[in-house]
Image: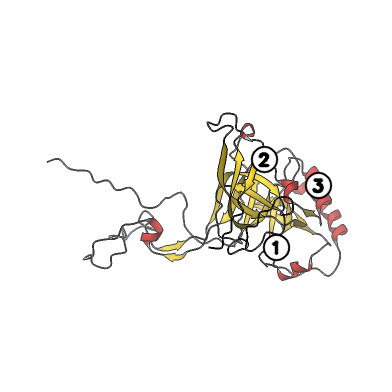
Amino acid sequence: MGHIKRKRPRRGSLQFWHRKRASRIYPRIRNQAETKDVQLMGFAGYKAGMTQVFYVDSRPTSPTKGDELCVATTIIECPPMKIMGLRLYKPSITGSAAFCDVLSDAFDIDLSKKITLPKKKTEQQKIKDAESKLEQAPEIRLLVSTQPKFAGFGKKKPEIFEMAIGGSDIKTKFEYAKTVLGKEIKASDVLTSGQYYDAHAVTTGKGYQGVIKRFGVRRKVHKSEKGVRRVGTLGAFTGAKTWRVPHPGQMGFHTRTEYNKQVLLISNPKENEINPSGGLINYGVVKSDYILVVGSIPGPKKRIIRFTPAIRMKAKYQTQAPELQSISLRSQQG
């Protein structure tokens, strides 16, 4: 008899390596789409739950064109964000380095839960200093703080992160940053219904797990030595690491990006009711503006989700918002 080749697909994807915990609970964005328009490149909201939406398919090349579809959607509550400052970057040996910050004098008291607030008002003076340093700065970003006190799940401590500004001219970006400094930005000012965006989030954490749950390895026979719920060999003893062999370790709480998520609706509970009877399980009641996103989004409820313009979506594939027929308000209380 000839040799029978044994099939053994590798266990676990090498797309993400290594599988370590995210450094913070809200995601860091390292790459963004480019645009000629001077605008805020993205928004952030809190994952509230999921529901069903009924709408008429209006895509011209769709086989279900004209039919009513039922689609699972994720509810993201988006309280207005506040522009608390701007930051200039200059090139350095290790990459871009921040060298000048301008903070707005219009601070919310809730920011004291996150940072130490300055006692003196120095906004105008720092704007003049930053303007004189624009020649050294090829990049400018906005410092943005969330306002979870307007959301429906009782959080008060805000998140602070950077947001990119679209455009190519640094002076035009700086003028735009000055106009929005200290002001509130709503989701409807940045996002558009029917368009596609990339969702950045930190996935649900599952802690330290073994190879069976983490990589899908099969259990060994019950008479195996040194354990059943483990791999048969850990590979060679020599070498820096045996990364080709499944190992126990951290599972979940990873920074992940899902591309091309379509926003179906941008609204508020007064215009379009979204809260089912009894509220959303493990979240509460949506009180401020919200968006409906087709499909699921990484992470548990109450976690912040960041949206940026789709980096892999061509402009010709952007579509108009479909005509919604109804939103399911069926109670989720058991």
- 3 vs 164, left or right, is left
What residue is disc 1 on? 148
Q: CA distance from mark 3 to mark 2?
A: 17 Å
The front one of 101 and 207 is: 207
Does the residue at mark 2 contact the one at mark 1 (Cβ under 8 Å)?
A: no
- 213 vs 35, left or right, is left
**Disc number for residue 130:** none
Residue 146: where, in percent of width, then height?
71, 60
Q: Earlier in the sequence, mark 2 or mark 1?
A: 2
Residue 195 visible from this viewpoint? no
Q: Earlier in the sequence, mark 3 or mark 2?
A: 2
| Amino acid type for the residue under numbered disc 1 | Pro
- 56 vs 235, left or right, is right
**Residue 99 occupies quadrant:** bottom right
Under circle 3, the secondary element is helix
**Residue 126 occupies quadrant:** bottom right
Residue 73: where, in percent of width, then height?
58, 49
Q: Earlier in the sequence, mark 3 or mark 1?
A: 1
What residue is disc 2 on? 34
The quadrant of the rendering that contains the N terminus is top left
Q: CA distance from mark 3 to mark 1?
A: 25 Å
Under circle 2, the secondary element is loop
Under circle 1, the secondary element is helix
What residue is disc 3 on? 176
Compared to 306, does 227 lie above or below?
Answer: below
